[in-house]
Image: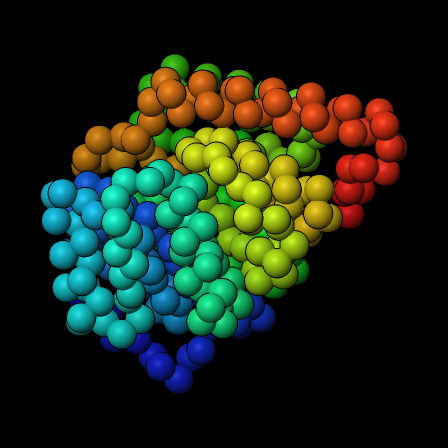
Amino acid sequence: MGVVADRRTVGHPGVGRVLVVIPTYNEADNVDRIVTRVREAAPAVDVLVADDNSPDGTGAIADGLAGADPQVHVLHRPGKEGLGAAYLAGFAWARRRGYDAVVEMDADGSHAPEDLPALLDAARDADMVIGSRWTRGARVLNWPLRRLLLSRAGNLYARLALGVPVSDATGGYRVYRAAALDAIDLASVRSQGYAFQVELSRLAHRAGVRMVEVPITFAEREHGDSKMSPLIVAEALWRITTWGLRDRRAAARRPDALARWP
């Protein structure tokens, strides 16, 4: 892979041991390059490829990467169960092995590994860091207008419906410190895709997790097919509406039901 890890360096300064979880399904064209870029951008972190039994051989490629680098690991899952389930499995894998922070990162290159050090630096003073596409200084490259409008509208709706004070509640480039994962009721999470990211933002907000946003450069994938579908969008819309109505009913019954934003 062209990367020699400095084993004298344990984790990221001020954060500790870090695991980057990369879910994959049919990402044979991307998994090698994204893992290589992560290892070059942040040599002290470990990588876990969580593969959903990809029929295109992604898992075998990941095994080869792991065999060549002790800081790369593979979690073979029995089948395609969705993004949310893959991340939850990755969180559990990390917590069992004592990692201090877990990073969510897409396999398709849309999340630039070169932005990872900045996200980890921000995690020194926060429990959850969102790599934001919609905060000052961020850039979104090569997205068609309809995707831009969909993301903007979805995030605005999530913010208004749920009261979560972030500009990119659907963003999937994140750092969770152990304290955040412990505070969030992960056992209650059932959603996928956009809805999964929004649900974790909502639960973190309700739990009083210290959350910050860091601008990133987000680029449309160059290889492979997008996993976005109308069903994923419909799930997010339905779940956000349901959560918003539920939270408002709870607040009406008990004014302190929602955690105060720190």
x, y percent for residue 239: 55, 25
Residue situated furthest bottom in the rendering: 8
| In this view, 130 is above or below 40 | above
| In this view, 210 is above or below 217 | below
x, y percent for residue 131: 50, 44
Residue 67 seen in the figure = yes
In the rendered structure, the answer to whether residue 253 lies left or right of residue 144 reads right
What residue is at 49 percent from the left and 72 percent from the top?
98
x, y percent for residue 234: 45, 18
What residue is at 22 percent from the left and 31 percent from the top?
225
In the rendered structure, the answer to whether residue 152 lies left or right of residue 210 reads left
What residue is at 58 percent from the left and 70 percent from the top?
14
What residue is at 28 percent from the left and 66 percent from the top?
72
Q: Nearer the viewer, residue 36 or 104?
A: 104
Q: Nearer the viewer, residue 127 or 6?
A: 127
- For the N terminus, the image quarter is bottom left
